[in-house]
Every structure is written in C-alpha cells, then in structure tokens.
Amino acid sequence: MARPEIIKLRDMRERALLGGGKEGIEAQRSKGKLTARERIELLVDVGSFMEFDMFAQHRATEFGMDKRVALGDGVVTGFSKVDGRPAVVIAQDFTFLGGSLGEIHAAKIVKAIQYALSIGSPIIFINDSGGARIQEGVDSLKGYGDIFYWNVQASGVIPQIAIIAGPCAGGAVYSPALMDFIIMVRKSSFMFITGPRVVKAAIGEEIDEMRLGGADVHAYKSGMAHLIAEDDREAILLTRKLLSYLPGNNMEDPPRVEGGDDPERRDYELDSIVPEDPNKPYDMYGVVERVVDVDTFFELHRFWARNAIVGFARLNGYVVGIVANQPAYLAGVLDIDASDKIARFVRFCDSFNVPVITFVDVPGYLPGSMQEHGGIIRHGAKVLYAYSEAVVPKLTVIVRKAYGGAYIAMGSKHLGGDFSVAWPTAEIAVMGPEGAAEIIWRRELDKVRTPEEREELLQKFVKEYRDRIANPYVAASRGYVDVVVEPNETRPTLIKALDYLLTKREVKVRAPPKKHGNMPV
C-alpha cells in the first residue's frame, strides 16, 4: 500500500491536470478549442514533456480569490522536445479564470523564458487568456512588464513563437508582438489593445471582436499574423513545420536536411518565365519554387504586403531565407508595408544564421501622397538598414527590373551583398527606359509634329537606352553583378556560391565602438 505522502502527491497531480475543473474543460471543448494540455501533447514528442511549477498557486486573497484556487494558476509550463530537438513550452489555461494573468502566473512564464535562454532552445507560447487578472491589480501589471522585459532579452538569442489560440487583449498583445512569429487560429482567436465596448464608448464605432482583431484582420491588414490556421491542430502543425527551419539559438546553424533534390538540376521553364514585354506581370512564386529544393518553400505573411514575398526554403538541404518582389501584385513595387515585411524578415535571418537569397524585380517605390505622408522614406530606410547590418551570406538574383533606390535596397552589392547574379532579362538603371528616354531626348521628342512620329522616335530612344545602359552587362563590367547566367542555371549557380559563402567571415571597417545602431522605426 502506498504511503500517505505518495497518495497526496498523486492526488495533487490529478487536481493540477484538471486545471480550472471539469466544467471548464467541457466549456473549452464545446467551443472547438483544445485544452492547454491537449495542445502541448499535440505539439511535443510523445513522453518528452517535463512540467515545472505544476503546483504553483496565486497569493491574492482580495475579492474572493482565497476561494478560487487552481494548481498551476492557469498556465502550464515545461521542457519538451519537438522532432527530437529541445523546446520550452508555455500554454495558458483558459479553464481557470479565463487564463487571466496574475503575479504567479506571470512568474511561471518568466521562468520558462529564462530556462529557454539558459539552455538555448526556442520558446513556444500558446496564448489563450482574458487578460490581466483585475483582482490582483498592480501585481498583474508588474507580471506583464516582467514578461515583456524577458521577451526583449530573448530577442535575437532564441526563436520565439506565439500561437494565438483564443483571446489576447490589452497589454497581453505586446508579448506576442515582441516575439518573432505569430500564428493565429481563425475560428477562435483575436488580438486588440482595446475591445469593442471600449471602442464604442470612446469613438462611437460599433464593431465585433473578429472584425476588430480577428485572425484575418491581422493576416491581411495589420501584418501581425505571420501564419493563419483553421483550428488548434493546424496551428500546432504549422508551428512544428516552422521550427524545422530554425536553429535552437543564435549560436547554432539551422538544421540541414538532405532532400534528395539534385543540386545540378536545371529547370528550363525558367528560360521563358519572364515575358518579352517588360511591362507584363508574371508570378515570382514560379521562379522561387523552381530554384529551391522541391516542396521546401514555406511562406510567411502570405496575405499581407503581397507585392513582396518572404519565407524559408532549403537549397541543397541548407535553410535559406527567401526575399522577393512579386511583379504579379502592384508590379512588385516597394511600399510601406512591403518595406516593413522585408526588413523584419532579413533581421530575423541575420540573427539566426540563415543566409538570405533575394529575387529582384522592382520598378521602384510606390508613388503618391498616401505613401509619402505615411512615411515611405522612414519605412523604406528599414530595408537599407536591415541588409546593410546583416552579416549572413547574402545572395541576390536580378530577374528583371531593378530601378533606382529600390535596386540598391534589394540586397545589392552596395549594401554588402556577397554574390550577385543577373539574368539576361535584367534591367538595372536609375529609372525605366521609357522615363529615361523622355528626359534624355526631350528636345528631340519635342521637335516631332505628330503623336505617331513622336511614339516611333520614343521607342527608338527607349531601345537605345536599354541597349547602352539598362542591361546586366553594364553592371557586370563594373563588378556590381558577379555573373550573368541563363535562368536555368540559377539553382546550381546559387548552390555553388552558397557552399563557398557558408564559411564567410565579415570584415568590418574599423569604427568607433557603439551599443547598437539607431534603426529607423
């Protein structure tokens, strides 16, 4: 017969596993949501989860809190392995007080982040909380501040992934915002600073939770959500896939996976993918997916700032970060949102030793008062800063248009790019041939009497400008382009260049010491 102490321990474990109680668990499941422990079980390798602080309890006694106690205090934390690699997991338990955050609840989360930092492993934070525990007052606010502080300490040291699987409102939104990636569940999650009631009281606007801060809002409009899932299970699967591209910490390289894709493979469809008409759009996904290892491209921010593409892929088994203009959407121009999207992704890649491959087809920056008044100068400067600051291998493929300041911004040699490849279709110039011809040969064009004659002469000058200035061989003659290749040669060329650059050591010009730069934000 077991000793009383053993029996008590078993009883306490059973109580802890119930969280806020059976009724709360059933209510959670009735909404189509998994419980905190079910989410963890789905995420981690079987038998790998080792929980800590299972018996933690809040200390508050005000407003009846002395009668409302759950072992674990509404959050589950522990060590685990995901696909055999260490990870620390946090899962808020909505069954106890709506997963609200108090002093001890927050202390558990902080300890989990500190553990992840000390062992050098990613942190996965599954958010499902009604927000600050109002019964605990300033202790709850202090808890949020502690979490934010440790999110910042972990930034650039370990990957941080937030899954939003339920409510995330008020101050709670800033922890995911400080993390690297946010995955939202379409059916059950939302994020906002102020809820619908406050919005209506403050400005008279009537709006519901999903239209204010649902997954679609943050995937399509705000850009907060990197990935969107239909339910908890899909969110977990996306998390596991994302982790497969990431190192455990900033001192490791991302995991290489031999996929069996021939490094010498040439896809001859690339030779005809760019239209003969330089103003005709095409789909850049067709370029990226033909160059990288088969079925390895994992896109982020797919629905936001669609004129730019970012995501992870593998090239000869090595993880690489993909940045590309998308000529099929807004002609691939850089605007405020695309600039933010690219800069943030490049900085993550640089933090975690992921080489960056940039596919360029950019006619410039989006013109207009909305962009200028919205701060395109400041936002565009983020891209310049991110590429200039990055010390990982940076490889660039100029597919077609590369005009003006946007050419410089998109991973050019002038911002420290390591290896620049151009296709024969590349056009590298201060501006497009049409605009350039209008300026250079303005007097000759003004002398022509009829519109037909003027257009014929203009096209002659456009061709002359394209032949003499806007072609890859001029840039190659200056050393700004390292090689000009047939499109079908792109994959083997990049693989060979990457193989050499993986041992890259950055040589910096001697400069005064500094804490850090002041990036435009």
Image (cartoon, grey):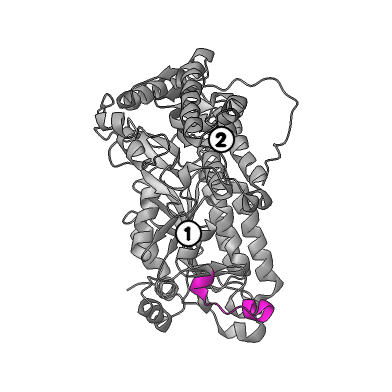
Q: What segment is highlighted magenta in the picture?
A: 198-212
- Magenta stretch containing residue 317, yes or no? no
Mark 2 in CB contact with mark 1 (< 8 angstroms): no
Q: Position of residue 432 (x, y in %)?
A: 52, 32
Q: Amino acid at mark 2?
A: Ala
Mark positioned earlier in the residue sequence (2 or 1): 1
- Tell me the residue at 46%/77% (across/down): 95
Residue found at the far right of this picture: 512
Q: Gap in Å between the C-alphas at discs 2 and 1?
A: 24 Å
Label 2 secondary element: helix
What residue did someone put label 1 on?
Answer: 220
- Tell me the residue at 61%/78% (across/down): 205
- Tell me the residue at 58%/46% (across/down): 155
Please, is residue 490 above or below residue 294 in the view? above
Q: Which one is in front in this view, the residue at disc 2 or the one at disc 1? A: 2
Q: Main secondary structure of the magenta part?
A: helix
| Residue 434 appears in the picture as rendered | yes
Is 473 or 189 nearer to us in this picture? 473
What residue did someone put label 2 on?
Answer: 406
Is 163 or 58 nearer to us in this picture? 163
Task: Name the image quarter holding residue 68.
Answer: bottom right
- Magenta stretch containing residue 205, yes or no? yes
In-image side of 151 versus 98 (left or right): right
Please, is residue 278 above or below residue 5 in the view? above
Q: Position of residue 172 (x, y in %)?
A: 59, 65
In-image side of 114 versus 519 (left or right): left
**Could you tell me which quadrant the N terminus lies in?**
bottom left
Task: Name the image quarter holding residue 440.
Answer: top right
Q: Position of residue 67 (x, y in %)?
A: 57, 85
Label 1 secondary element: helix
